[in-house]
């Protein structure tokens, strides 16, 4: 199972951690953290993660996906 959260660091609290522990009870997990300050880099990473682009994709290819009519 894979779940992505987009939230502000001010929203991180014991309840958030407890919800993760409940969802992945007794399993090893990977936690990856990235800031979204550069929205283009975040969008590129998201598109690669979702299989919409390869890791060698150009910004032009990303723009085609992001700004498709």
Image (tube, rainbow, N blue to C red):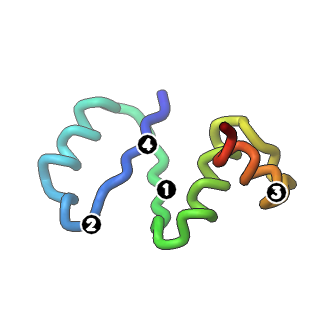
Q: Given contact means CB atoms under 8 Å apart, are the residues at marks 4 and 1 in contact?
A: no
Q: Mark 2 points at which residue?
A: 9
Which secondary structure lies at badge 1?
A: loop
Note whether 35 is above or below 31 in the view shown: below
Residue 5: mark in rendering: none
Q: Name the residue under label 4.
A: 4
Which secondary structure lies at badge 2?
A: helix
Local crowd size for mark 1, using a 10 Å CA cut-off: few (<14), some (14–19), many (≥20) = few
61 or 50, which lies in front? 61
Question: Rounded to the nearest whole Å, what is the CA distance between mark 3 and mark 2?
Answer: 31 Å
Note whether 25 is above or below 30 in the view shown: above
Local crowd size for mark 3, using a 10 Å CA cut-off: few (<14), some (14–19), many (≥20) = few
Which secondary structure lies at badge 3?
A: helix
Q: Residue at x 46, y 61 (%)?
A: 33
Local crowd size for mark 4, using a 10 Å CA cut-off: few (<14), some (14–19), many (≥20) = few
Which mark sits nearer the N-terminus, 3 or 2? 2
Question: Rounded to the nearest whole Å, what is the CA distance between mark 2 and mark 1?
Answer: 14 Å
31 or 57, which lies in front? 57
Which mark sits nearer the N-terminus, 3 or 4? 4
Question: Rounded to the nearest whole Å, what is the CA distance between mark 1 and mark 3?
Answer: 26 Å
Which mark sits nearer the N-terminus, 4 or 1? 4
- The x and y percentages for residue 46 are 60, 48
Residue occupying the far bottom of the picture:
37
Question: Rounded to the nearest whole Å, what is the CA distance between mark 3 and mark 4?
Answer: 25 Å
Q: Name the residue under label 3.
A: 60
């Amino acid at each position: 199972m894979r779940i992505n959260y987009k939230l502000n660091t001010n929203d991180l609290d014991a309840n958030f951690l407890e919800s993760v522990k409940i969802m992945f009870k007794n399993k090893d997990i990977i936690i990856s953290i990235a800031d979204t300050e550069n929205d283009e880099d975040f969008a590129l990473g998201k598109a690669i993660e979702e299989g919409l682009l390869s890791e060698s994709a150009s910004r032009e290819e990303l723009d085609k996906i992001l700004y498709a009519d």
